[in-house]
Amino acid sequence: MTTTLHGAAHPGVPLATAITAHFATPPSTGATALLTAPASYRVALVEPDGTCTAPDGPVDLSAVYEARVFTAGAELRWLGEANGPGRAVVLTEDPALLPEHFPETDGLAVDAIDTLDTHHLLWGEAASQDGDWTTLSSARIGTLAVPVRTSGRVRLTSRQYVAVEPEHGNAHVVEERLIRLEPYAIPTPQEDARP
């Protein structure tokens, strides 16, 4: 059975507009945003009005040059352009979640022969909590506030899409879509022992 990952792109859209257009209306509300700026890396929650907020309040998106905003159903990727507002792409398995005003769809769909749910462990361990936010801390990286309530670690869940290369028949991961941040307890050696 194949799984189709659908995509739609908008070649000239500011980040705030792209977020508001897609993640401020159900069923896409409750998104998490990974925001990269020259002087910072922030994790934020998308509010119903499209505002990205962190524990210290609304996040200024003007310096952000790359963003990945996601829910369990869809991911928005946005990349700022030197002489323009930026390019946005939405990826989802449900074509009903594609924004109607994102005009480009040709060549963006991926027909996968398999999907792999994967996990990426975030740097740091819980150092403090503020409501539903946890600050992760690592001597090597510093601190990062994430919208996950935990006393341990946090991991990022994603789904990889595997397709077959037509010329030689090799299977490979062609795309990955972010799904959620979640608490993670590192197994003890006894729990991880293999029979």
Image (spheres, rainbow, N blue to C red):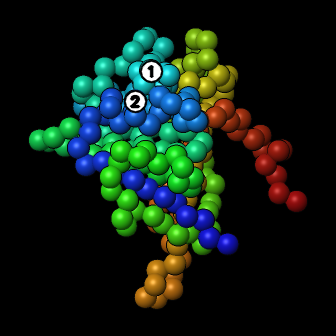
Q: CA distance from mark 1 to mark 2?
A: 7 Å
Q: Is the residue marked by circle 1 packed among few (<14), some (14-19), or many (20+) residues within 10 Å?
A: few
Q: Residue type at mark 2: give it.
A: Thr
> Quadrant location of residue 54?
top left
| Residue at the image point whose x is 42% and y is 25% from the top | 50
Amino acid under label 1? Asp
Q: Residues within 10 Å of mark 2 (few under 14, many from 20)?
A: some
Callout count = 2
Q: Which residue is mark 2?
A: 20
Question: In this view, which residue lies farthest toward the right?
Answer: 195
Instruction: Judge by depth and name the residue closer to the eye, 183 or 152.
Output: 183
Image quadrant in which the C terminus is located: bottom right
Image location of residue 104, percent across then percent down: 33, 56
In the image as oriented, which residue stretches furthest toward the left?
83
x, y percent for residue 105:
37, 59
Q: Which mark is residue 156?
A: none
Q: 65 left or right of 24?
A: left
State left or right for residue 17 relative to residue 92. Answer: left
Q: Position of residue 135 (x, y in %)?
A: 53, 20
* Residue beneath disc 1: 49
Q: Disc 1 vs disc 2: Cβ atoms closer than 8 Å?
A: yes
Residue 88 found in image quarter:
top left
